[in-house]
Image (cartoon, helix red, strand yellow):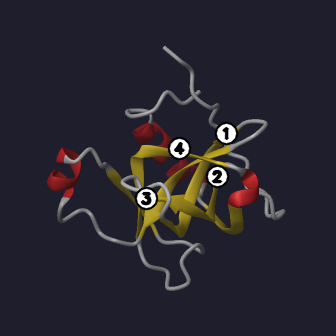
Amino acid sequence: MRRGPRVTYAPHRDGRPDPGEVVWAWVPYEEDASQGKDRPVLLVAADRAHVYGLMLTSQDHDRDAAQEARAGRHWMDVGSGGWDREQRPSEVRLDRLLRLDPSAVRREGAALDRPRFDAVVAAARQFHALG
């Protein structure tokens, strides 16, 4: 089995994107990579050239979880945090691992606490070979 990026938890409020932080970056749409939107992303890993993350949304997918799962999309509640000015509850998409150039990250939003980070990573490992 191919080994994926190595997971670390190392948030530092230093202006650089670090695993454990929720950052803002442009995320391409799956159906058309030439289009996308700026959205929060939970960084879970990094290597020499990239950071890896899972996108967040404030949309509630609990109501349509079965439909989302049939479409191959799996979500997990992570609560609210400083990444959302309105402090709305967020969900993280577990099945889509994003590889981002660190220069594409626009700003740090907040750090996810370690217990929530660990729970997200454990759930995401169902879908990704994370180191």
Q: Position of residue 23 (x, y in %)?
A: 64, 63
| Number of other residues with Cα within 10 Å of mark 4, as a class: few under 14, some 14 to 19, many 20 or more | some
Image position of 82 with respect to 128: above or below: below
Question: How far is disc 3 from disc 4 in space, using C-alphas?
Answer: 27 Å
At label 2, the amino acid type is Gly
Quadrant in which residue 131 is drawn: top right
Q: Secondary structure at mark 4?
A: helix
According to the image, label 3 marks what residue?
29
Residue 20, which numbered label?
Answer: 2
Q: Earlier in the sequence, mark 3 or mark 4?
A: 3
**Residue 68 relative to residue 46: left or right:** left
At label 3, the amino acid type is Tyr
Question: How far is disc 3 from disc 1 in space, using C-alphas?
Answer: 26 Å
Q: Residue sitting at 60 percent across and 75 percent down?
A: 82
According to the image, label 1 marks what residue?
8
Q: Secondary structure at mark 1?
A: loop
Q: Residue sitting at 61 percent across and 63 percent down?
A: 25
- The answer to whether marks 1 and 2 mark residues whose Cβ atoms lie closer than 8 Å is yes
Q: Position of residue 71 (x, y in %)?
A: 22, 48
Q: Earlier in the sequence, mark 3 or mark 2?
A: 2
Q: Position of residue 26 (x, y in %)?
A: 58, 64
Q: Residue sitting at 64 percent across and 31 percent down?
A: 6
Q: Residue sitting at 79 percent across and 36 percent down?
A: 48
According to the image, label 4 marks what residue?
118
Q: Earlier in the sequence, mark 1 or mark 2?
A: 1
Q: Earlier in the sequence, mark 1 or mark 4?
A: 1
